[in-house]
Image (cartoon, helix red, strand yellow):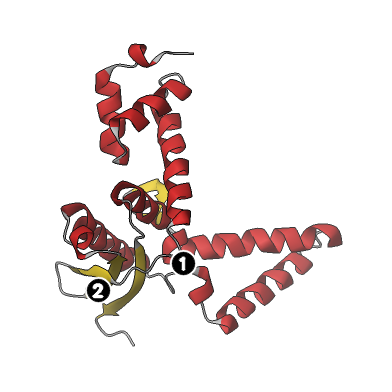
Amino acid sequence: MTSVKEIPTKLVAELRARTGAGMMDCKSALQECGGDLDKAVDILRKKGAAKAEKRAGREASEGWIGSYVHHDGSVAVLVELNSETDFVARTDDFKALAKEIAVHVAATKPLAVRIEDLPADVVERERRVYESQVAEQKKPENMRAKIVDGMMKKFYEENVLLEQKFVKDDKRSVGDLVKELSGKTGEKVEVRRFVRFELGGN
């Protein structure tokens, strides 16, 4: 196992830039995985996610509305990103994430923020379609439910904001970005809602 002293400062700094975690946490994560930067990122994400889960019960009533208007004026998005304090909501990182999510929504057209926000009839319709497809493919009975669940997971990843892969980094979901900022700020951070306007749309 690589010791803390053998971890180059440059590597620690790079990990800190990528995750926003503290220096000692970065050193510890790099030590844990023998200096593998990608593995260290995963370790810090898991720790950040765990901390974020503990903050889930807190109320996030402050925030910032991020906006994006496409250069030709054909698409516009507003996103409400919430935090626990006005102090965090006014930071550059917080405003930047609100803006990044607005750009993401413009590109991906999500149907809802969270899985539970999807209309029940939409979920039911998708599930019925997948069940019919699986039945037509003559898949074994005992495998069908699992296959349909897998298809539903893909549907959520394509249509639910927090489940979608971030357009600028497909190794992370939008939900991961929110958890990372929560880990960095020590506050509950959540996307409350978004609205997307498209010229000529409904």
Name the residue nearer the viewer: 200 or 40.
40
Query: Residue 160's mark?
Result: 1
Q: Which mark is residue 121?
A: none
Residue drawn where x is 78% and y is 68% of the image: 135
**Nearer-the-camera pick, 183 or 93:** 183
Q: Position of residue 105 (x, y in %)?
A: 32, 66
Residue name at image x 36 percent, y 64 percent: 190
Mark 1 or 2, nearer chain start? 2
Residue that mark 2 sits on? 78
Q: Position of residue 151 (x, y in %)?
A: 63, 62
SS state under label 2: strand
- Binning the other alpha carbons within 10 Å of mark 2 as few (below 14), some (14 to 19) or many (20 upward) gives many
Q: Is residue 49 left or right of residue 23?
A: right
Q: Residues within 10 Å of mark 1 (few under 14, many from 20)?
A: many
Identified by mark 1, the residue type is Val
Whether residue 140 is visible:
no
Hey, which quadrant is residue 192 in on the image?
A: bottom left
Q: Residue at x 25, y 73 (%)?
A: 77
Observer-nearest residue: 120 or 128? 120
Outermost residue toward the bottom in this view: 202
Above-or-below relation of 184 to 175 = above
Residue farthest to the right? 141
Q: Vertical placement of 200 versus 33: above or below?
A: below
Q: Secondary structure at mark 1?
A: loop
Please, what is the three-letter code of the amino acid marked with disc 2?
Leu
Q: Which residue is depicted at the point 44% across and 13% down?
A: 2
Asked whether the beta carbons under mark 1 and mark 2 sit within 8 Å of each other, the answer is: no
Estimate the spatial distance between the alpha carbons at disc 1 and disc 2, rounded to whole Å. Answer: 16 Å
- Residue 59 placement: quadrant: bottom left
Image quarter of the C terminus: bottom left
